[in-house]
Structures are given as C-alpha cells and as structure tokens.
Image: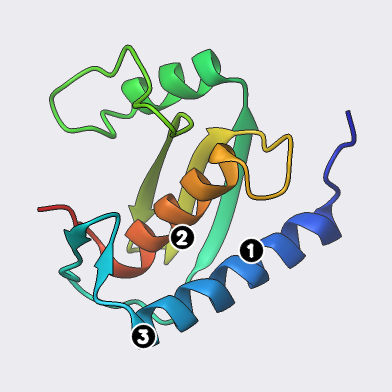
C-alpha cells in the first residue's frame, strides 16, 4: 500500500477545496437532500487524522462528534469520519479512514467532513 506524503495531502486538500467551490457554484442538491448552509467560512486551517475504521469511530465517539448518539456502524457507502471546528484557532480537524483508492468512500467522506467545516451543519 502506498502512503500519502505531506505534499500529497496538501494537493488532496486543495483539490477538495476546488471541487467544493465548483459544487457550491452550481449545485443546490447533494445526495438527493437539499443543502442548507449554516454559514460559510472561506478560510481556515485543516488537520487530517487518518486511521482505520474502528480507531476513527473511537476518536469520533470520544469527541461526541455525532451529538449525543454513539455510532457503532458506518452507513452504507460511507467511511468512518467526523470533524470538529475550533473557531478560536480557525482550525478544522477531520478524523477519517485512510483512503486506499482514488475516489473511494474514504475520499468522499473526507470531502463531506471538509464541507461541514466550511458550511457548518447542512443535513436536514
């Protein structure tokens, strides 16, 4: 398995930001659900923590990333992932499974969590 280096992660984050910008410019719906932005943060720092599925679930549950519920299973087609935004430090921390292939479920989840840092809560 090939590891992703720092420059690769920086390129991945830049690519995700560009994809998000394009998506926000032209799309009103994602996954069949209307997107309602809570806010928009045009600039912030990002720290990504990669781990396996169970370590990611443990980290997210420890941070109460899903409110009061504990997630034991990962939804179909998704990877384990969550985020926490620290407004004081203008820092988005994302915990997600390490991607193994281009455009796999872990990459989709990473983009989803990055979008939460940008737009806040957008699920209905």
Q: Return the residue at label 1.
A: 13
Left or right: residue 82 versus residue 95 is left
Q: Quadrant of residue 104?
A: top right
Q: Return the disc, 3 or 2, that comes first in the chain's sequence.
A: 3
Quick one: label 1, few (<14), some, or many (20+) residues within 10 Å?
A: some
Quadrant where the N terminus is found in the figure: top right
Quick one: label 2, few (<14), some, or many (20+) residues within 10 Å?
A: some
Residue 20 lies, in percent from the top left, at 47, 73
Q: Nearer the viewer, mark 2 or mark 1?
A: 1
> Residue at left 58%, top 52%?
47
Q: Quadrant of residue 80?
A: top left
Residue farthest bottom in this picture: 25
Residue farthest left in this picture: 124
Residue 105 visible? The answer is yes
SS at badge 1: helix
Q: Nearer the viewer, mark 1 or mark 3?
A: 3
Image height check: is 85 above or below 64? below
Q: Return the residue at label 2.
A: 91
Q: Return the residue at label 3.
A: 26
Left or right: residue 50 versus residue 42 is right
Residue 65 lies, in percent from the top left, at 29, 34
> Residue at left 47%, top 44%?
109
Q: Return the disc, 1 or 3, that comes first in the chain's sequence.
A: 1
Residue farthest front in this picture: 32
SS at badge 2: strand
Gap between marks 3 and 2 measured at Cα: 27 Å
Q: How many marks?
A: 3
Residue 43 visible? The answer is no
Gap between marks 1 and 3 measured at Cα: 20 Å
């Amino acid at each position: 398995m090939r590891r992703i280096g720092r420059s690769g992660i920086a390129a991945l984050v830049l690519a995700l930001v560009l994809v998000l910008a394009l998506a926000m410019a032209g799309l009103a719906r994602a996954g069949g659900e209307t997107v309602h932005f809570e806010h928009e943060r045009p600039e912030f720092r990002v720290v990504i923590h990669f781990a396996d599925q169970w370590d990611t679930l443990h980290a997210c549950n420890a941070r109460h990333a899903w409110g009061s519920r504990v997630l034991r299973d990962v939804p179909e087609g998704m990877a384990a992932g969550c985020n926490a935004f620290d407004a004081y430090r203008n820092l988005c921390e994302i915990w997600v499974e390490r991607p193994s292939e281009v455009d796999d479920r872990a990459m989709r989840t990473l983009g989803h969590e990055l979008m939460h840092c940008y737009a806040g809560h957008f699920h209905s």
